[in-house]
Structure formats: C-alpha cells, structure tokens
Amino acid sequence: MPRPGYDIITREGVDPTTAAGKPPLPPIGQVRFESHGLSVERNAPVRLRDGTAIYLDIYRPRQAATKLPVLLAWGPYGKHHQSSRLWPAAEVEEGWISELTGFEAPDPVYWCGHGYAVAYADPRGLWLSEGTFFHNGPQEAEDVYDTIEWLGAADWCNGRVGMLGVSYLAGIQYIAASTNPPSLKAISPWECFADWYREFAYHGGIPETGFLPRASRNVSYSLYRTEDTYANIKAHPLMHDYYRHKYGELSRITVPAYVVASWSDHGLHSRGTLDAFELMSSEQKWLEVHGQKKWRYFYLPESVARQRAFFDHFLLDQDSGLQSWPRVRMEIRDRPGISHVRGDLPWPVPLTWATRLYLGVGRDCLAVASPEERSGRTFDPRTEQFDAAFTFSEDTTVVGPMRLRLWLAVEHGTDADVFVAVRKFDRAGTEVGFPFNALFDDGPVALGWLRASHRALDEQASTELRPVHMHEREESIVAGKPVPLDIELWPSGTVFHAGERLTVTVLGRDFVSRSVDPASPVIRHEDLRNEGNWTIFSGGEYDSYLSLAQAAPPAPSRTGALPSSPRRG
C-alpha cells in the first residue's frame, strides 16, 4: 500500500484505564491461565518489523492432540472488552455466546471447542500496545500482515490463519487479504464499509455527524498517540488520498472469502460489503445478504454453523458441504419476521433488469410513462416532505441499488442537502418497517443522500441503477434555477405484493431521526446547508424518475409487474 504524502492529524492518547463502559484493563504482563476450560495466554507480545510490540490474547483448547488453525480478530475496542450480552435491542439471545466473547468477534469457547485457536489483537498504539495508532491504511496493513505470519509460524499452529468478525473486524480483513500474507487461508468479513469517503465520512457529500465522533473516540485509548479520525475527516471535505489509501486494492484479494452483507445498515456497511464482494478476485467466494439486525445475525446459531462450515473446509480440510452452497444467497424481505431466501439471484444485479418509474409531481405519483405536462411542487424541506407513490399490480421483487433523478430548484442559497427514503406500504396503507441500524425495527426499504454542489458524476463508473459522484469539487447552484440531481439509493431486497405501494420520500433532513444516547450507533447529519423552500419539477424536459431493478420470480413462474428498459444512464 502507498505511503501517504500528506499529514495525518494525531492526538495524545486517552488513559486506557479510564475507558467508560469497559471492564477493568488487565496489566501489561504476559500471563497464562485457564478459563472456561480453555488455555489462555494474555498479552502475548508480537514484535512487528520495526520492533514495535503489540499484544495478543490467545485462546486454545486445554488439550489439543494436533496443531491448530487460528482465527484472528483484530479490532480497536480492547481485547479485554468481553461479554456474553450486547444491548437488549440487538436481540442476541442468552446462551448464544460466552462471557469471553469480544465485541463483534468470534466466541473463543465455541471455536476452541471445535478444534480452533482464537487470537484477539490490540492494534499498534491502542490500549497497551506500543506505537502511534493509524486508523487503517499502510501501517496497519503491514502490522496485520506481520501478526498473521507470526501466528502461522507458532509451534502450536498448523500454519493456517483465518479472519472473522463484524465492522472494523471485517474491514481489516479487506486490508490483510489485499497484502496476501502466505499464512492467511480464508476470510469471512461480516458487514463493513469499503469506501471511507462515501460510506463512512460523507454521505453524498453531506458530513456524517452522529457515528463519526463515536468511532473517533473508540480509537483514542492509548499510552501513546492516535490518529484523530474525526479531525482528519473534517479537514478533508472533498475526496482526497486520505480516503483512497485507507484500504488496499480489493481486486488483489484472492483468498477464499465468505462475505456477509445486509440490507439493514444503510449509512454505514450495506453498500460497501456488497462492493467488496464484487471487487474481490477470489475464485472461491460466497456472498450472503440478510435483512436483519447485524449482531443478532452474526451470532445466530445457524450463522455460526455456516461460519464453521466455511473455515472447516479451508483450515481443517474437512468436507463440510461448502461446494454445494449457492454463490449468492439473498434474504428478500416482505415484512417483519417474514422473508424468503433465494439462491438463484446474481450479484451485482444485471442492468437489463432496470426499469424507470417517472415522477408525476402534480399527482404525487410514480408511473411507467413520463408525464407530458410540466408540473412543480414547492415545500419547506426543513419541516415538510414530498411523497410520490407507485402501486404494484402484481407481486414484484425489487433488488439492488436504485437511482433517483430529481429536478430541483432552491428558493434561497446556493446549495441543498437532499435526503431520500424508499418506503413500503401495505394494501391497508400502513407503513411496513424493517430492521435498521443494528438496534431498531422501524427503518425504510432504502436511504440515499446528496449535497447538490456535489452532483458532478463519474460518468464511466455510473450506471442506470447507480450514480457515482466524484466529490472532487463543489459546484454551487443558482437560486430559482432547476438542476438535475442523480441520487444513489443504497441496495435493498424487498418483495411488494399486488396492491402494495412503493413510496419515495424527499426531505431536507434525516428521515430516520432519533433522540438517543450519543454513544449509540446511529447515523446523523446535522451540518446542513438548507434554507428556504425547494421546488421539485417533473414532465417535459424535467425527466425526474426512479430507476430500480425488478428480479424475476423464482422458477417456474416468470411474470413481472414492471416493464424492462436496460438504459445505462
């Protein structure tokens, strides 16, 4: 990975013994003991290539007849941060994990009981590990490479290392696998963004102000210095090498991969995990997409069984039935608690599945034909919203990203921060809510965002279903002059039955807005540029439309409710 040719803002570390909400931090000394029937080695030092020492906790079966593969969990939350419970709303049920389980990490009691070792790492410069912490990027790539090779060479290891975990513990797998350490034999990243700018820092160019401060605090506990993630992001409001260098080239990943994404983490992980799967060059790779709460799904016993089947195949040479898995497995959501899993759909979805629904502002509707007459609707986006609906005549599965083209004029100012939600309403007109943001049950089908001054497109990367914005400069808008905005709506998979409605909602603030503990994993956008009324236009030269993909029903039926139009945009 390239070394940065720019400065990264760092700060003094926060005393790691003062971290709120964590168990007491054990002292730095290396010790061995038994716990829960396991042999535990705490604070095993790993000397990295520059001599810096980082510390691992290693869990092994108390008696192992053969050498063991090891699962590495690498995250910033403290290897001592262990619990058998998460927030109640996460719905991780009692008994699913032991009290030795690290946050978003595999449970050592389970995995050691099935012939594995588990290693938890505190990265460089976090907690008691030495050095300055850099949040992803070239230094962390070298460090995780060295750690994998150290584990693979251990006298108790069979030379095979796998990686498993959620969020940060998934993103580090992108980094590790792109450097191709010889001992890394398989990865299973569960839900992590892959684009630091578009998915973590700025949504459509709009700064994220809820989760980012929390994420920055999470990487502040150190005896040394740490990267000030939030300060760096605020210092780079446009696309910059700071973001480009965070992950390696995902196309360089060739190791077997079991990638798990969700429809339920819009604003953080949904888009990027799907992109990571698509970009990997691995000949043996599988994708699973669910629509549930991410921590519950990760620790669900059926999910853990699939994790084990994957790693048993590549780390233990066991025939676990892996080769019979569909390459892509998608949960298509219907309503809370009701969904169906399909193994016949590809990812990415073909552009030939794309169709357009045209906005009719005068009738608050979406239709398969563009309205001939021009019309406009004026509203205050700070307190009101605009809704347009399409009623399905037949059962229809909508899957993949969506693209909303919107002609918009502002009454005052030179910019607009546009928020969009796609929602489902049943035949009785009641909104159908879905799991959202790891802890909630009332989310929409999909979300999208765009700051109007960031509307310039990367035409080569953009498609009929997905606009890609460059975010390299800002281009002001002129008050009273309509401009076309192409807004990306993150991927989803939802069935709409005959008589049910898909509604597009446009507003100038977060559609999902919660007054909750700032420490919770909720995205927010509070640094906005909206002032005065907006007017949305349709008809004539104002080709406002929603482009979406309609999947074919499972065989043998192949009826559909919408016409197909394979436009490329």
Image (cartoon, rainbow, N blue to C red):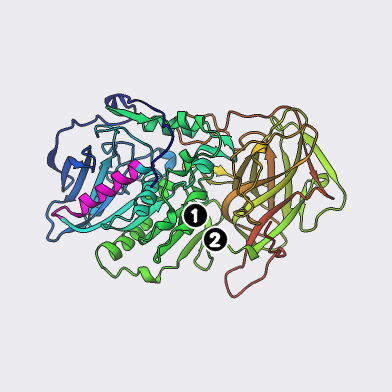
Q: Position of residue 198 (x, y in %)?
A: 54, 43
Q: Which mark is residue 274?
A: 1
The residue positioned 66% from the left and 57% from the top of the image is: 464
**Residue 143 is covered by the magenta coloring:** yes
Furthest-right residue in this view: 373
| Magenta region, main secondary structure | helix
Q: Is residue 104 above or below residue 69?
A: above
Question: Position of 279 compared to 415: left or right?
Answer: left
Q: Quadrant of residue 155?
A: bottom left
The one nearer the camera, 66 or 528, is 528
| Residue 317 versus residue 416 in the image, above or below | below
Q: Earlier in the sequence, mark 1 or mark 2?
A: 1
| Residue drawn at the location 54% of the way across and 66% of the way down | 345
Instruction: Report how far apart the C-alphas of labels 1 and 2 lie in the structure.
Output: 8 Å
Residue 197 x, y percent position in the rendering? 51, 41
Span highlighted in magenta in the image: 139-156
Q: Residue at x 24, y 33 (%)?
A: 130
Q: Which residue is mark 2?
A: 348
